[in-house]
Image: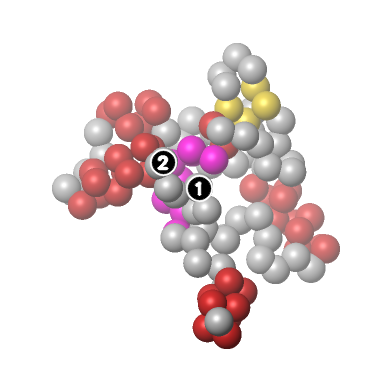
């Protein structure tokens, strides 16, 4: 039981691979939903957050550790975008369809 308590205290999310899945499902504390695109309005075409610098600076001032970024992908189960990117990276590249879908 002690071992389980220790594991629960650790963040064990796999690394973010910028698939865009999380920002296409819901918004974070800083996001706003775009009802035309059905994703966060701050998600860029290459699956980056356009508010990244602003958020990191703000969270740094608050002393948050870990902050929003750098915690990993905690929406990795049943995430078709992530699975597709991982399979394609194992095969040596990313296809155009994935680039369009995030």
Residue 84 % position (x, y): 30, 40
What residue is disc 2 on? 79
Q: Residues within 10 Å of mark 2 (few under 14, many from 20)?
A: few
Residue 68 on the magenta segment: no
Q: Is residue 2 above or below residue 91?
A: below
Residue 53 % position (x, y): 67, 50
Which residue corresponds to the image point at 35% horizontal and 32% vertical from the top-left?
Answer: 99
Asked where in the image residue 35 lies, by quadrant, the reply is top right
Q: Is residue 43 visible?
A: no
What residue is disc 1 on? 75
Residue 20 on the magenta segment: yes
Q: Where are the magenta residues, as a range?
A: 15-22
Regarding mark 2 in the picture, which secondary structure is present there? loop
Residue 23 % position (x, y): 57, 37
Residue 54 % position (x, y): 73, 48
| 102 sits to left or right of 52 | left
Q: Nearer the viewer, residue 1 or 71?
A: 1
Asked where in the image residue 29 lies, by quadrant, the reply is top right
Q: Quadrant of the C terminus?
A: top left
| 38 sits to left or right of 32 | left
């Amino acid at each position: 039981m002690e071992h389980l308590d220790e594991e629960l205290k650790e963040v064990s999310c796999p690394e973010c691979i910028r698939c865009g899945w999380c920002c296409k499902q819901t918004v974070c504390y800083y996001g706003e939903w775009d009802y035309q695109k059905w994703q966060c309005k701050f998600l860029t075409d290459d699956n980056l957050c356009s508010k990244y610098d602003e958020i990191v600076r703000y969270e740094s001032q608050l002393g948050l550790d870990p902050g929003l970024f750098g915690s990993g992908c905690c929406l990795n189960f049943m995430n078709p975008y992530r699975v597709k990117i991982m399979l394609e990276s194992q095969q040596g590249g990313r296809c155009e369809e994935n680039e369009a879908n995030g």
